[in-house]
Amino acid sequence: MTRRPAGWTVAIVLGTGTLAAAQKVVGPEEFDRAMKTIGAAVEGVEEALGSASYVEAKTPLALARQVLASTRPEWETNGQPDAVRMNREAVAALDALDKTLSATTVDAAAVTAVLGSVTRACDACHATYREGDAQTGYRIRSTVSRSGR
Ligand code: HEC
């Protein structure tokens, strides 16, 4: 199998930039960059898991977790308690995946199950708070009231 450079290595660079600039994401543009980083990082996780590279999966996983947590204050500032809760749940799902990958003997079925709960946690928030599509681009749903910006 030839190994192509993983997309998330780019995400790592971007993500590190995001984190260096600010430990918390402020405003829709930073939020968008953060989500792109999280998306690429989770793809990296899925790729690594696809070849049972459990240790390798932990690097993009840590990035996704870190950047996702850094988007929470944005929802707090905008008075969106449901989004804050969904953010917490998604971060918890990423933590559960990390825990599963840290077992002495990794249980492949458990990994698949926890990965499913990660996807559901991401989708739950997207269903409520995201609009747009891959062609036109994604945005925070315009019906979500944003205070002060
Ligand atoms: C609490 C809400 C919330 C959670 C949790 C969440 N997202 Fe998002 N996400 C959004 C919103 C809102 C947008 C649209 C805003 C944007 O893209 O600027 C978005 C956009 C995205 C995009 C599109 C970015 C683009 O513009 O191309 C990706 C990819 C993405 N999220 C991945 C994920 C993944 C993977 C997870 C789970 C690990 C996740 N998100 C969890 C709210 C969330």
Image (cartoon, grey):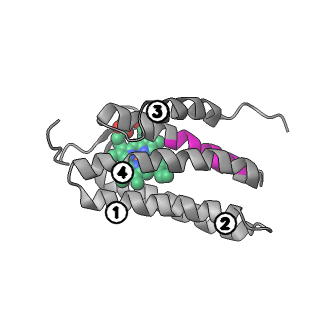
Does any portion of residue 132 appear in the rendered image?
no
Q: What residue type is labelled 3?
A: Thr
Mark 4 or mark 1: which comes first in sequence? Answer: 4
Q: Which of 54 and 133 is in front in this view?
A: 54
Whether residue 43 appears in magenta in the rendering, the answer is yes
The residue at 48%/36% (across/down) is 19
Is 122 positioned to the left or the right of 2 in the image?
left
Measured from the top left, where is residue 88 in percent x and y? Answer: 41, 61
**What quarter of the picture does the C terminus occupy?**
top left
- Circle 3 residue: 18
Mark 4 or mark 2: which comes first in sequence? Answer: 4
Report, in whole angstroms, how far the alpha carbon at label 1 lies from the one at label 2: 22 Å
Residue 72's tag is: 4
Does any portion of residue 60 appear in the rendered image?
yes
Looking at the image, is mark 1 or mark 3 nearer the viewer? 3
- Circle 1 residue: 85
- Circle 2 residue: 100
**What quarter of the picture does the N terminus occupy?**
top right
Looking at the image, is mark 3 or mark 2 nearer the viewer? 3
Residue 131 falls in image quadrant? top left
The residue at 20%/48% (across/down) is 144
Q: Which amino acid does label 1 sit on?
A: Arg
